[in-house]
Image: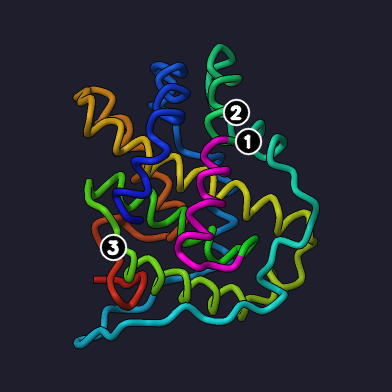
């Protein structure tokens, strides 16, 4: 996700994240969310010798989070992973993260309410946080296309309820966007101890969601690959 776009959200999200204080050590979502994503996407393909750019695929109805919006509920559920004193601040931070994600969707020309794009945001946000590097827009769009196609082939996802699709869409987008934005905040205001906790959380998110050691995965022009 482009650095200039992410900086637009720093002032609001950084203030909310800092209000949570030490709770940022626990930015990993509930394990069930990451495990649910892993069950849907399976194992990423091995890297090809000569990767080529992948366009964003057209989105079918089965990929859309057609259930009623439940942003506050989704944010509140994620915030339960934090100590009680920090839950209100983190609920607000996740809500703001989702609002920023919706703007980013539009800027990148992605379809609204697309679970494949939100899955890509979760992966890219945690990858950027752990690797300490941005994911270029063309790599992110390839990842979106890959997740769209993967979810469209997954019978369990296709048959899941509208409410389940909506919760998955909102929570994956919230966590991925929060991780990407908070990484930028740590770059501007370094904190060695917090950085270690933050990267550990990103590692836990990725490994639970993808099912592989984080050192084995890469986001490239092919999308997500095993190296």
Spot the residue most to the top.
85
Do the CB atoms of the residues marked 2 and 1 lie less than 8 Å apart? yes
What main secondary structure does the magenta stretch of the protein show?
Answer: helix
Q: CA distance from mark 2 to mark 1?
A: 5 Å
Q: Is residue 105 left or right of residue 22?
A: right
Tell me the quarter of the image containing the N terminus.
bottom left
Q: Is residue 213 left or right of residue 111?
A: left
**Earlier-in-chain disc, 3 versus 1:** 1
- Is residue 99 rendered magenta in the image? yes
Which residue is rendered at x = 53% and y = 67% of the image? 110
Q: Nearer the viewer, residue 163 or 3?
A: 3
Magenta stretch bounds: 96-111
Q: CA distance from mark 3 to mark 1?
A: 27 Å
Question: Which secondary structure, mark 2?
Answer: helix
Question: Which one is in front in this view, the residue at disc 3 or the one at disc 1?
Answer: 3
Judging by the rendered image, the residue that carries numbered circle 1 is 75
Tell me the quarter of the image containing the C terminus.
bottom left
In the rendered image of this protein, does residue 27 appear above or below residue 121? above
Which residue is rendered at x = 47% and y = 78% of the image? 56
Mark 2, residues whose alpha carbon is within 10 Å: few (<14), some, or many (≥20)?
Answer: many
Question: Which image quarter: residue 46?
Answer: bottom left
Mark 3, residues whose alpha carbon is within 10 Å: few (<14), some, or many (≥20)?
Answer: some
Q: x%, y% of residue 70?
A: 74, 43
- Say which mark, if any, is on residue 136: 3
Question: Which one is in front in this view, the residue at disc 3 or the one at disc 2?
Answer: 3
Question: Which secondary structure, mark 3?
Answer: loop
In the rendered image of this protein, does residue 117 appear above or below residue 91? below
Judging by the rendered image, the residue that carries numbered circle 2 is 91
Do the CB atoms of the residues marked 3 and 1 lie less than 8 Å apart? no
Q: x%, y% of residue 152?
A: 62, 78
């Amino acid at each position: 996700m482009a650095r200039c776009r992410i900086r637009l959200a720093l002032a609001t999200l950084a203030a909310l994240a800092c209000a949570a204080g030490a709770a940022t050590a626990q930015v990993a979502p509930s394990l069930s969310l990451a495990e649910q994503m892993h069950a849907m996407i399976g194992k990423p393909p091995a890297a090809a010798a000569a990767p080529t750019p992948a366009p964003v695929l057209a989105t079918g109805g089965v990929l859309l989070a057609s259930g009623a919006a439940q942003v506050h509920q989704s944010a509140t559920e994620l915030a339960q992973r934090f100590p009680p004193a920090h839950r209100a601040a983190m609920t607000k931070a996740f809500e703001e993260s989702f609002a920023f994600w919706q703007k980013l969707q539009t800027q990148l020309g992605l379809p609204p309410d697309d679970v494949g794009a939100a899955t890509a945001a979760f992966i890219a946000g945690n990858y950027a946080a752990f690797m300490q590097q941005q994911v270029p827009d063309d790599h992110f769009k390839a990842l979106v296309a890959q997740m769209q196609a993967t979810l469209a082939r997954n019978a369990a996802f296709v048959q899941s309820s509208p409410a389940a699709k909506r919760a998955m869409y909102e929570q994956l987008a919230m966590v991925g966007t929060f991780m990407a934005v908070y990484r930028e905040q740590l770059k501007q205001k370094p904190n060695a101890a917090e950085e270690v906790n933050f990267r550990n959380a990103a590692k836990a998110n990725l490994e639970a969601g993808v099912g592989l050691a984080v050192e084995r995965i890469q986001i490239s022009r092919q999308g997500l690959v095993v190296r």
